[in-house]
Image (spheres, coloured by chain):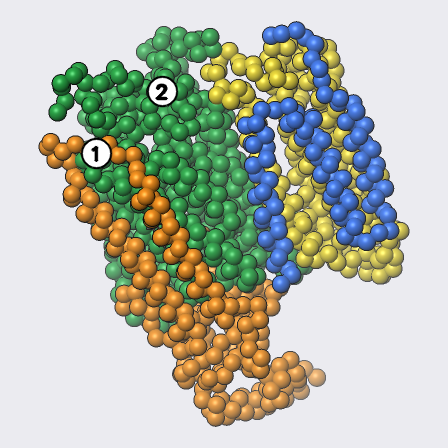
């Protein structure tokens, strides 16, 4: 009875949606609109974070030379177009902060968490649509606060995205006061938005699955988003708590991290990484889920080892809680504890291996259609593997003594975050774009974007391993200060030029994204011939999603089922209905 | 739904128990015993009180298992981090 | 109890767990609250473990009798809350309103007593940053003589003040939020929004309220009595 | 160039480098396996007219094999790491009789406190030198390090040695240099706007050179202390 009411509502209103423009597109409670809002916000931040990276690369590739357009910046940032050291530190900090908190995380969780969960489990909307809307606008205000930091006296936060105390807690030592406070405040507020979002997602997945959508019929993207939401729910409050303590240390004179009065600088690091390591898995798990969906569809084959993929996601999610110390091997932490963290860290390679090999197994004996999303998905597997393998070096404590805080780490984190998360996002955006906007993105330019990105991306980040093992430290403004880094200058220049090309390449994606919105070829309901529930609705899906609540009959990836006319069996279609008439087929 | 008469848990009895336990805590805290002993007893009393609130006032005792799982899930994580970081000061 | 959980609201799809969204959502949200307090209380435990010498013995600086009364008040408010819930389960609208009003009032009293406690303590000389210079406590600590039925005060209380105000402050903040939400629920109760069949709002706010009470039980023990 | 670590001059070098190369080989194998596999599959199983994907849900044997192989490999890496770690940073790793120096880091310099002629640290004849650490070759050396303001990190790439120095904590950093020469000390932990230029030198001497240097500097410090003592009176 409950459901029928909702259905009637959709049937009558799906066509004549009489909500005002503001209710429909600004303060909408529709999960799809909120998702797209999150997406647009994060893409803007992604472009901004990328721009900051270009400034970083200019300084590293051409230290001391005036930056192009640098004269536009105020004297407190760049004197006569030449970047100041304090501005460089703020740039690195904000590049990391923006990329992690305002670009990748809201793209994965905000955009796709919102957009996919109800569509893929067959629900009309989120469990709490209004909280969902609040979550977005809270995130926006956090973003505004974070941006405000660029314009305040003393410059923006400059203690790295990890904000290590006491540097971050002591304006007298860092020269930054208001910037660092805004950084804390913004993260606390963003944390609230994330927690509200995660509460919503978890409730929705637990409670609002369509009839027949059992746990082991959930697509892997939903499993990944679900586990990542749990990580958000439990990890983010730790950051909020820590950031509050830091904020108090800065403003009202508390002593949490102040060694002079017995406070513990390492306490900040423990809390930050107790949040921080689950956070990096928040940044990869959803991408892994999307890639599984895209690869199965692209290979026209069920995901290889669907159940073990789920167990791998769960165990990555769990193990992620007991490895945080691997960021602190050289921090002065109890060395015995360090040893324990080595073992637990290395163990994460096991579920990760399961995932990598199962993706390969999915491609094995398939019939792979290399559309743009599939290219990005394969690129994801290739690049994530490199990033994961470089993680193994650091998880061995002795090796980490040497490469900790060098560009080897920078290489690792970009291989997993760009090669992993961002490639996964490119796959997901190009794959679900038609469902979001009703139009296809341009395939030709999509492929051009993929190949150029692949080439330049590796040209940027691969050599970083090399300068890393030569001892090149992170977060240094001018490597030419050191004799042992002088021979690496040409490599730095090469990296920078590649980075500029990489950045320019992303323009193709931006243009493709924007132009396709208006001019793209119209997409039907199911352009990729995929099996997910979302493809049974019109593109874009109407308010309320489904004409009638779907019933689920099948596992998520029933591709190429023998004896069927079509090579895919949607989750909401009974197998016997689509069985080919006898004799047809081969 | 059905008729209006429910069997409620013994709320008042629990209230009385909580009050007594609190008075007990106050009493114990000022006993001239060793610190460790006091900490153990006080923690025991606090956990007992907390459990009563969770089980009866929050109805965990009468809930379905999904809710119980949700309630218990974060607890191991709270212990892990505190224990690990405490080792920092005694090695 | 059982049938309260079974009742789906008219506009919701049938919940897969048989527990309505609001309740599931509140329990999930409380999970994040547990972690938030883990960060705070964990830091308290860790810092105290590292520097026990900065803590005064119970009752020296903090006023135990006042806080004991406050603790009792919070327990009372939990009971009034649960009574309100029991009332609406039985369809007793008057009972619901009365018990809710009582809860709001007691909660507000708790916060007021805490504000009084802060003002008093700051006057006495304990600040988040440590002793207030020239205050009674600071002078007593500097003199090194026994203070109020205990040994001499610690020479420095930077961490003590820091953690005391942060722990109790964030608990107080939660109570304040709870009072505001509770006031909203009360207002709805006076408009007859809750029935025997559907009183999810009362149950959900109750869960939050009891959780805050539960946190206080822990805090009272470790901050005041240990 | 490439993945080769540059030449190192401490007793840690062979062990850390060896571990690094072992991991490089192991991950190299995994890398080649995965990347070649991906490229090969991409060609072999690309969509072609008439090709139909096989309806396969998985293969338990294969999955058990790669799970087990990975698990065993990483456990081996872990076990190999333990002794090296214990040697460099373990609880009781500092060798008895190591030459001790005080190192105090602050924005943005490294101050080294030398034991002076009596060979004892923290006595009246100690002297301080800014950004210069002089040590004898082939001797165990331990730095009693701390920071005055924020966290810094003592990093000597040529020694394969890195240790954060945290205000309020005392770090014991030890090493044994194997080749004389000047080497650079860097700060590896972001410590403010001057982090990039918090540079110092460690000079490894032969024992004779070292003794001579120490005597000279001690005398110099003595004479410098005299006038300032007068001035302050
Ligand atoms: C998406 C984000 C992401 C992901 C998924 C990972 C995954 C991993 N990370 Fe990474 N990490 C970061 C983001 C991420 N990391 C960031 C941002 C930092 C820097 C933070 C900062 O300081 O600013 C960092 C830093 C970091 C450090 C600290 C370095 C230091 O500062 O000194 C360490 C140390 O152990 C580490 C290890 C690992 C390991 C072991 C994995 C594993 O999960 C990887 C597992 C995967 C594989 C191993 C590949 C697949 C497996 C096979 C193909 C099978 C064969 C393999 C073997 C036989 C080994 N990471
Ligand atoms: C997901 C995260 C992410 C991403 C994508 C990137 C991308 C890049 N990063 Fe960054 N980086 C970090 C996360 C990330 N980084 C972190 C966490 C740190 C550590 C910070 C710290 O030390 O505190 C770091 C540090 C870091 C450093 C080290 C600085 C130092 O230690 O001194 C360097 C140096 O080269 C660098 C370079 C780059 C470059 C050249 C890119 C390029 O790939 C950028 C290319 C450009 C883009 C990706 C933008 C594309 C834009 C679009 C696609 C928009 C489309 C728009 C619409 C459709 C509207 N990064
Ligand atoms: Cu000192 Cu960086
Ligand atoms: Cu990590």
Q: Which chain is painted in blue?
A: B
Residue A563 picture quarter: top left
Residue C223: percent from left, percent from top: 74, 45
Q: Is residue B19 left or right of residue A272?
A: right
Q: Quadrant of the C terminus of chain A?
A: top left
**Nearest the camera: A455 or A333?**
A333
In the figure, what tint was chain C given? yellow
Circle 1 SS class = loop
Circle 2 SS class = loop
Q: Which chain is painted in orange?
A: D
Q: Are the residues under badges 2 and 1 in a single subunit?
A: no
Considering every residue shown, the one lying at the far left of the view is: D49
Q: CA distance from mark 2 to mark 1?
A: 24 Å
Q: Is residue D166 left or right of residue A497?
A: right
Above or below residue D70? Residue D219 is below
Number of residues whose C-alpha sits closer than 10 Å to that of mark 2, classed few (under 14), some (14–19) or many (20 or more): many
Q: Which mark is residue A552?
A: 2
Q: Mark 1 and mark 2 in contact (Cβ < 8 Å)?
A: no
In the figure, what tint was chain A given? green
Residue A151: percent from left, percent from top: 46, 46
**Nearest the camera: C204 or D18?**
D18
* Residue underneath mark 1: D54
Q: Is residue C46 left or right of residue A450?
A: right
């Amino acid at each position: 009875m409950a459901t029928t009411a909702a259905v009637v509502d959709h049937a009558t209103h799906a066509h004549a949606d009489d909500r005002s423009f503001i209710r429909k597109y600004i303060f909408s409670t529709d999960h799809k609109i909120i998702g797209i809002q999150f997406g647009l916000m994060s893409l803007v931040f992604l472009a901004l974070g990328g721009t900051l990276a270009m400034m970083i690369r200019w300084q590293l590739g051409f230290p001391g030379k005036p930056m192009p357009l640098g004269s536009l910046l105020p004297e407190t940032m760049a004197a006569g177009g030449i970047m100041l050291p304090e501005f460089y530190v703020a740039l690195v900090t904000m590049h990391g902060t923006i990329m992690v908190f305002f670009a990748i995380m809201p793209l994965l969780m905000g955009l796709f968490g919102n957009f996919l969960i109800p569509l893929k489990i067959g629900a009309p909307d989120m469990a709490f649509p209004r909280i969902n809307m609040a979550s977005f606008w809270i995130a926006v205000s956090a973003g505004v606060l974070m941006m405000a930091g660029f314009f305040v006296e003393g410059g923006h936060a400059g203690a790295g995205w990890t904000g290590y105390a006491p540097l971050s807690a002591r304006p007298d030592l860092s020269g930054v006061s208001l910037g660092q406070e805004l950084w804390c405040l913004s993260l606390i507020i963003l944390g609230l938005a994330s927690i509200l979002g995660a509460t919503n997602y978890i409730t929705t997945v637990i409670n609002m699955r369509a009839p027949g959508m059992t746990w082991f019929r959930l697509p892997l993207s939903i499993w990944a988003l679900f586990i990542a939401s749990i990580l958000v729910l439990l990890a983010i409050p730790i950051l909020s708590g820590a950031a509050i303590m830091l904020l108090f240390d800065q403003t009202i004179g508390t002593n949490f991290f102040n060694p002079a009065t017995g406070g513990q600088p390492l306490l900040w690091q423990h809390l930050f990484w107790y949040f921080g390591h689950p956070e990096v898995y928040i940044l990869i798990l959803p991408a892994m889920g999307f890639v599984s969906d895209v690869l199965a569809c692209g290979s026209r084959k069920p995901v290889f080892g669907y159940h073990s993929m789920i167990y791998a996601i769960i165990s990555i999610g769990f193990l992620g809680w007991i490895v945080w110390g691997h960021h602190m091997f050289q921090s002065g932490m109890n060395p015995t504890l360090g040893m324990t963290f080595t073992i637990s860290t290395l163990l994460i390679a096991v579920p990760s291996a399961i995932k990598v090999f199962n993706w390969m197994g999915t491609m094995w004996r398939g019939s792979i259609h290399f559309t743009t999303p599939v290219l990005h998905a394969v690129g994801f597997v290739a690049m994530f593997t490199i990033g994961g393998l470089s993680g193994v070096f650091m998880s061995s404590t002795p090796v980490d003594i040497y490469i900790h805080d060098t560009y080897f780490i920078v290489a690792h984190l970009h291989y997993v975050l760009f090669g992993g998360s961002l490639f996964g996002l490119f796959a997901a955006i190009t794959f679900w774009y038609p469902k979001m906007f009703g139009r296809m993105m341009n395939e030709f330019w999509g492929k051009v974007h993929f190949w150029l990105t692949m080439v330049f991306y590796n040209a940027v980040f691969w050599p970083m391993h090399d300068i890393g093992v030569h001892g090149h430290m992170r977060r240094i403004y001018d490597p030419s200060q050191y004799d042992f880094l002088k021979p690496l200058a040409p490599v730095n220049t090469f990296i920078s030029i590649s980075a500029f090309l990489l950045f320019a390449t992303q323009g193709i994606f931006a243009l493709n994204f924007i132009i396709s919105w208006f001019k793209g070829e119209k997409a039907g309901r199911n352009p990729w011939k995929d099996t997910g529930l979302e493809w049974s609705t019109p593109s874009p899906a109407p308010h309320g999603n489904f004409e009638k609540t779907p019933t689920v009959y099948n596992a998520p990836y029933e591709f190429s089922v023998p004896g069927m006319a079509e090579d895919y069996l949607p989750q909401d279609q009974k197998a016997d209905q689509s069985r080919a008439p006898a004799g047809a087929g081969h | 739904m059905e008729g209006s008469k429910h069997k409620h848990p013994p709320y008042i009895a629990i209230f009385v128990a909580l009050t007594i336990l609190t008075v007990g805590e106050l009493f114990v805290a000022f006993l001239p015993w060793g610190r460790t002993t006091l900490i153990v007893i006080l923690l025991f009393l606090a956990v007992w009180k907390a459990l009563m609130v969770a089980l009866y006032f929050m109805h965990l005792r009468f809930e379905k298992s999904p809710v119980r799982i949700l309630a218990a899930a974060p607890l191991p994580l709270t212990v892990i981090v505190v224990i690990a970081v405490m080792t920092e000061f005694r090695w | 109890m059982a049938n309260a959980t079974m009742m789906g609201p008219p506009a919701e799809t049938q919940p897969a767990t048989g527990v309505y969204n609001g309740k599931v959502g509140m329990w999930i949200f409380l999970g994040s609250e547990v972690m938030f307090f883990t960060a705070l209380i964990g830091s308290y435990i860790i810092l105290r473990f590292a520097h026990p010498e900065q803590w005064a013995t119970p009752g020296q600086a903090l006023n135990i009798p006042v806080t004991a009364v406050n603790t009792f008040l919070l327990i009372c408010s939990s009971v009034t809350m649960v009574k309100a819930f029991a009332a609406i389960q039985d369809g007793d609208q008057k009972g619901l309103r009365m018990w809710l009003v009582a809860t709001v009032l007691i909660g507000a009293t708790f916060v007021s007593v805490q504000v009084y406690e802060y003002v008093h303590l700051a006057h006495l000389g304990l600040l988040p940053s440590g002793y207030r210079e020239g205050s009674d406590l600071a002078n007593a600590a500097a003199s090194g003589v026994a203070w109020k039925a205990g040994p001499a005060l610690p020479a420095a209380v930077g961490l003590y003040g820091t953690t005391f105000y942060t722990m109790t402050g964030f608990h107080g903040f939660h109570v304040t939020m709870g009072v505001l939400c509770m006031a909203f629920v009360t207002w709805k109760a006076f408009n007859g929004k809750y029935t025997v069949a559907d009183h999810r709002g009362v149950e959900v706010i109750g869960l939050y309220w009891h959780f805050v009470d539960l946190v206080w039980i822990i805090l009272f023990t470790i901050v005041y009595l240990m | 160039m490439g993945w080769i670590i540059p030449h190192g001059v401490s007793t840690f070098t062979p062990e850390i480098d060896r571990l690094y190369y072992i991991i490089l080989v192991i991950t190299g194998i995994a890398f080649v396996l995965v990347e070649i596999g991906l490229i090969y599959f991409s060609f072999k199983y690309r969509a072609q007219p008439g090709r139909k994907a096989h309806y396969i849900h998985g293969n338990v044997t294969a999955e058990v094999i790669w799970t087990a192989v990975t698990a065993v490999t990483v456990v081996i890496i872990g076990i190999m790491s333990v002794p090296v770690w214990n040697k460099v940073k373990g609880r009781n790793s500092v060798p008895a009789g190591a030459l001790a120096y005080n190192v105090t880091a602050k924005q943005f310099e490294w101050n080294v406190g030398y034991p002076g002629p009596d060979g004892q640290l923290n006595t009246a004849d100690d002297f301080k030198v800014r950004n210069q650490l002089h040590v004898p070759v082939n001797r165990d050396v331990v730095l009693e390090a701390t920071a005055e303001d924020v966290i810094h990190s003592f990093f000597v790439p040529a020694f394969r040695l890195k240790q954060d120095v945290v205000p309020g904590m005392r770090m014991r950093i030890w090493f044994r240099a194997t080749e004389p020469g000047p080497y650079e000390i860097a700060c590896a932990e972001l410590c403010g706007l001057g982090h990039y230029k918090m540079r110092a030198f460690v000079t490894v001497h032969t024992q004779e050179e070292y003794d001579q240097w120490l005597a000279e500097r001690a005398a110099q410090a003595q004479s410098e202390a005299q006038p300032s003592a007068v001035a302050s009176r």
